Amino acid sequence: MKKAQNAASFTQILMLWHDKYNIRIMPWKGEKDPYKIWLSEIILQQTRVEQGLEYFLRFIKKYPTVKKLAAAPDNEVFKLWEGLGYYSRCKNLLSAARTIATEMKGQFPEQYESILQLKGVGPYTAAAIASFAYNLPYAVVDGNVNRVLARFFGIDIAIDSTKGKALFNELAQQVLDKERSALYNQAIMDFGATVCKPQLPLCNICLLQKHCKAFLKNVVNELPVKEKKIAKKHRWFYYIVAEYNNKLLIRKRTAKDIWQNLHEFVLIETSSHQQPGEIYASAAFKILAGEKYTVLNILEGFKQQLTHQTIHASFIHIKMNKKYIPEGMEMAEKAAISKLAFPRIINDYLEKAK
């Protein structure tokens, strides 16, 4: 009985906070168009709101409907996505848009189970679209939601464990205001982002304070608990910017690794830092450049931090004396380079090389 009362109090107070104090403004807030909701949710996966906002506005301007997005060339969409990272999201975005345009005649699905079948859409995104667009009673469960629930109910089960995922999903559905699911889901996400924050939560002004077990037990900063700690690794990329007759050797990354579907120059990857002389002496470089080549410039010290790995990059710009195109690569006019999508670290180089 007490747990049920706590759940009811949680929902009631949270909705009171939303009605009176939630002033968080975002362009998709209150949006009912499922296409725009879906687009915003995909962009915001693994992306801060501040960064994703400009991308969302650019996408909506260029592709105002799902049919417009579905008809766009891959390279054009990837170029617009450039800089957001996690490029599998962009690939899935295009795939889902084309499914909607062709198999569903441009009509976004209206049921949770049908939304969930779209490429790249998981339970969280499907719940967000179902509730925000159609006010269906599905609770969204993301990092903000997990943190608020773990603290308020004093749950020390790891949120990333199998048991924890099931428990938090069940609890989120239990405390959902099923009559106002769209407003409730927006409320709990905003509350986690602005009040019950990961660091320096605003407990002193929190309306839930009197009922929050984490606050009452002084364990706010210890919750939520995470089980897994993913080891971060370092990778060293040596890009050979190989030029011949004013053209550059490039390729599209197709392997299931970082930056899939983006372009790059000839790449020699090593497990540790190398000096330029060591790269010249490598078999891969000798096959590419042969014995006669001219080093035009070397730019080093580029770094890009990804979620679980750090990429260190150096760029060696050479002029080849003979034409050689390795398998999977092509020669591109310098003027065409600006129209292709590259990882941020390569764009940083191109900007500096100017």
Image (cartoon, grey):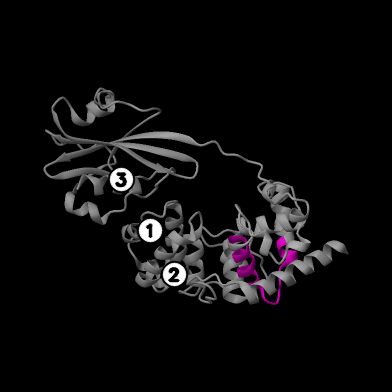
Amino acid type at mark 3: Ile
Q: Distance between the residues labelled 2 and 1?
A: 23 Å
User: If you read the primary sequence from the N terminus, does the residue marked by circle 2 or circle 1 appear first?
Assistant: 1
Q: Disc 3 vs disc 2: Cβ atoms closer than 8 Å?
A: no
| Res. 234 visible in picture | yes
Q: How crowded is mark 3: few (under 14 residues within 10 Å), some or many (20 or more)?
A: many
Q: Is residue 115 left or right of residue 235?
A: right
Label for residue 81? 1
Q: Distance between the residues labelled 1 and 3?
A: 15 Å
Q: Position of residue 249 (x, y in %)?
A: 22, 42
Q: Residue at 32% x, 26% y: name it.
A: 274
- The extreme front residue here reads 204
Q: Position of residue 270 (x, y in %)?
A: 37, 29
Q: Residue at 51% x, 70% y: name it.
A: 37
Q: In this view, does 142 lie to the left or right of 154?
A: left
The span picked out in magenta is 172-193
Q: Mark 2 points at which residue?
A: 102
Q: How far apart are marks 3 and 2 (CA)?
A: 35 Å
Q: Name the residue under label 3.
A: 346
